Amino acid sequence: MSLPRLHIDFNNPSFIASPWDTFAELRDKTPVFYDEVWNQIYFSRYEDIAALLKDKRLGRALPEGVERPPSHPAKRDFDTFQSKVFMDWEPPDHTRIRGLVSKVFTPQRVESLRGKIEATVHKLIDGVQARGQCDFVHDLSEPLPVIVISDLLGVPEEHRAKLRPWSDAIVKMYELGHTEAQMWAASQAAREFMALIGELAEARRRHPQDDLITGLVQVEEAGERLSEDEMRATCIFLLNAGHEASVNGASLGLMALFRHPAQLALLQQAANDPAQAGLFKTACEEMLRFESPLPMFERWVLQDVDFHGVELKRGSEVGLFYASGNRDPRRFENPDQLDVTRKDNAHLTFGLGIHYCLGAPLARLEMQILFKTLLQRLPNIRPAGEPVFNSGFIIRGLKTLPIAF
């Protein structure tokens, strides 16, 4: 099948702010197309995306023997870090590292953070309540996951101010069309971040503590351990992945609630009613579906695939529009309507298959506690200005969201 050729400017601010009309048109008229600017084949329908995510003939790693395009010198230290991130590997190495990490980053450990998350949310709200207004991103949604994941990893408080800028510089490299200045910044951030984790790991070897860095230093299974570089890169990956989706998911979610006041009212009524506590679970899933904080993921084709007549050649790259799949009317009833009571909500936001997001349980727990506590403490919360989007589409979120209460 000869694919249609289209180009989407992912860096266009209007597209970042509202890609929904574009996605609807793609799903209806051009569900699969090739973009020669980005040199990728894109899929926009839920059924196709879900199938490809579970197809082991596609993966996160470039197939063996396929030559990678030459890297820019400015990216050297970033590339060194990224080469050790296990989520970009395939079995058996991916299985080995994920198995080791899963022994430390357990559901029980995540649930044990509930009290800490609740206390942190209350403290953050205490800091702004008397002012009557604040920026939701800067004052609430951004610091919460940074504090939580830093505590979980065991990063001392004196280093935490550097974590968000480092993460911000690194994740810009996941966008398409980044600049040379962004490459240098990402490499510097990766270099400094790796050095800090190395220092903390050495300290934990001498004096173990109850944190993830200690766990990752000590974890072993069937004689397998993490190498030093694997351990450092895994810690950085957990911190970046552990807060980027949470920051953006919460901010975009509150924006969506402001734009659907009847849905916000349902949550306001439920906030102080123990019988309706479960509503915050379905509401957070719906916010993650409706305004996807990670709108697209890419996969390499590991072997030739005939996908419903579309020829995917080994070594080619596909882009999967999670955000489009999450609004596909072939899968979701009234997909452009925010419905915090939606039960059938198998959204794509955390992926599917062996690369399913390891931090999804933590992101969910943070969002549920944040929104419930927020609406209990600030029942009159309302917008105090227009939201401003960040410049990226792949990591999509808000720079500011002014609120009053």
Image: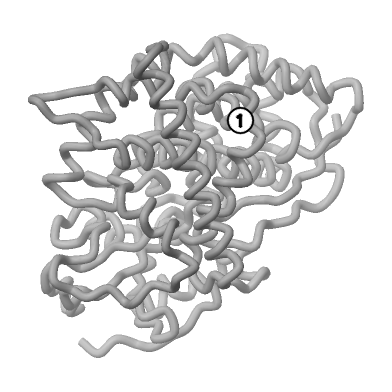
The foreground one among 58 and 240 is: 240
Query: In the rendering, at what x and y percent does residue 292 appear?
Result: 51, 50
The residue positioned 29% from the left and 62% from the top of the image is: 299
Residue drawn at x 86%, y 43% as measured from the top left: 384
Q: Quadrant of residue 229?
A: top left
Residue identified by numbered label 1: 159
What amino acid type should be assigned to the residue bearing mark 1? His
Label 1: which secondary element: helix
**Quarter of the rendering containing residue 228:** top left
Q: Is residue 31 above or below residue 53?
A: below
Question: Left or right: 78 with respect to 146?
Answer: left
The colour scheme applied to this rendered structure is one colour
The quarter of the picture where residue 31 lies is bottom left
Query: Which image quadrant: the C terminus?
Result: top right
Q: Residues within 10 Å of mark 1 (few under 14, many from 20)?
A: few
Residue farthest along the left direction in this orientation: 222
Identify the residue shown where x is 28% and y is 55%. 50
Q: Nearer the viewer, residue 97 or 310?
A: 97
